[in-house]
Amino acid sequence: PISFPQQPNSHIFCMEQLAMSILFLTPLLWTACLSVDDPTSALQETVAPAATAEEQCLSLRQLRGQLLQADDREFHEDQIMDHATEVSRRQNGTSGVHKGMVSHEAIEDVSITGTVIGSCKTYLCGTFAKDRSCQCNDRCTRYKNCCADYVEQCASHESNRMVAPAHLPYGHPSLKNYPRHNGFTLWLVEDFDQPIDLDNDPIWTWSDGGLKEGQVRFTKEQISFKGGKMQIRVQKNTGQQQPCSHAQTEIVPRKPLVSGELRTRYNMFRYGRYEVRMRAPHVQFLKPQVDGNFVASMFVFRAASFRHWREVDVEVTGRRAGAISTNVLNADHTSRWHRWIEQTDYPKTYPGINVRAEFHTYAFEWLPGVIRWYIDGRKVREKRNDNLKVPEMSAKVMLNLWIYRPTKYPFGGFELKNDRFPMQSEYDWFRFYRWNGDMHYPPSDMDPKGLSKDDLYLTSNNPCDGIPQVGLVEKNGRQYPACYAKCR
């Protein structure tokens, strides 16, 4: 990528005969002018109106921002310029448009890998990024580099801009200082140094669900807090659970095992960075080298009756010592899994680590049109919009541990016979950093009154959370009333 030096204050400088070697190292000589208001806002430039030379410079700056993404999007400058030139010809009815003299509007219409460049609908209002061709924050009017749809998408909503509360982060933080991530605000922290009241906490609660493909029923009692850790334990089911599950919105048959799932109360989390430090269970006591079957996870999930199935996962499994999979699902009006609603890297094994013997940090950044997963700070996967779109709706945060049912090809590990109970996973901490570009989720005061009707559809998690089950279960093209259980 090309490096444009930062300049203090407001100075204009020109770099003549700038050589760019893209693709086949073909040199192109450009003249680029850059005006920088301050060192932190490289694309908030001042552009003189009706000045052909400076319009040319603006176009080159826009192209530079796109070229900086070349490694990820696999395109080169000739493709952009040829496309933009053609757009300009169509708009202006001319045939003599030269490369480097492309109009601002033409650049805004350039489409790369199927996504439209220069749209506040895509970028989201209130956001700024150096590599964009135009901006969607309130400073863009001053610098004359707003996207074409800024007024329609953003101007009328500026008064409703989300302001981060002064008392952040929410949750139960124990430290005075936490790591920072550019473009994100630390919003929720759980250090698990004190127990969470799972019936009365304003953010967290427990699930009474039980996956159809799993052997466990989730109960509150299987979640505990001890020694600065949260523990989720799987053991034989010797109790009695009510058949109706609020979390599943249906009757769940009796399961041979019980386990736990910590989850947020409402669908109020969306774009941001999600991090957890955890250790997966030993399938046999003090034998971390033994393979078995389990799924220990951190994920976001929206699936009330599967009206909208949205999911982003990190799943640590018992298949191998370094078995970690990442998944994304996106579907509407389906109650069954199909291969075309999911993209996964399962089965994936990372050599040199043992997820049962040591704590590791797992994270994902969920942003509009892209998800990036990290293990111990190293990016291991990136997924962009393609035939399966990146989820765009708010969801709940969930942490759980479960065992797959006996079958020929069990997810989570083939060696079900090695499992010994009880077994438990340990969570050292959880952190959520809200993306600064999301003005809607979570609500600044974490009040569910700010959520939409669809966000609240069948959102109860257990019979004791006090959340009404509003809506009808949708299944196989029909609608049914949700079942109800008693709090006891």
Image (cartoon, rainbow, N blue to C red):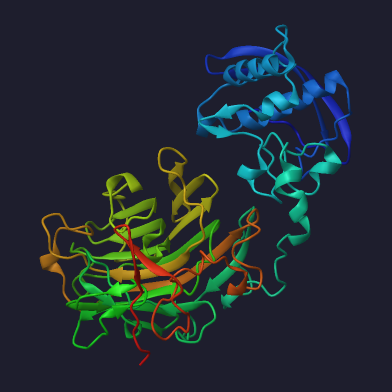
Percent of width and height locating residue 383: 44, 43
Q: Would you say 142 lies left or right of 82 here?
A: right
Screen quadrant of the N terminus: top right
The percent coordinates of residue 231 (x first, y second) are 36, 78
- Residue 225, x across and y down, in percent: 41, 83
Q: Residue 267: where, in percent of width, then height?
A: 50, 67
> In this figure, what is the number of numbered marks?
0
Q: Is residue 104 left or right of residue 286?
A: right
* As drawn, 120 above or below 53: below
Q: Is residue 311 above or below residue 247?
A: above
Viewer-proximal residue, 51 or 483?
483
Q: Quadrant of the C terminus?
A: bottom left
- Residue at horizontal 58 percent and vertical 28 percent from the top: 111
- Asked if residue 37 shows in the view, the reply is no
Task: Tell which of 152 and 189 is nearer to you.
Answer: 152
- In the figure, 213 relative to 127: above or below? below
Residue depicted at x 70% and y 66%: 164
- At a point 79% along the width and 49% down the height, the residue shown is 138
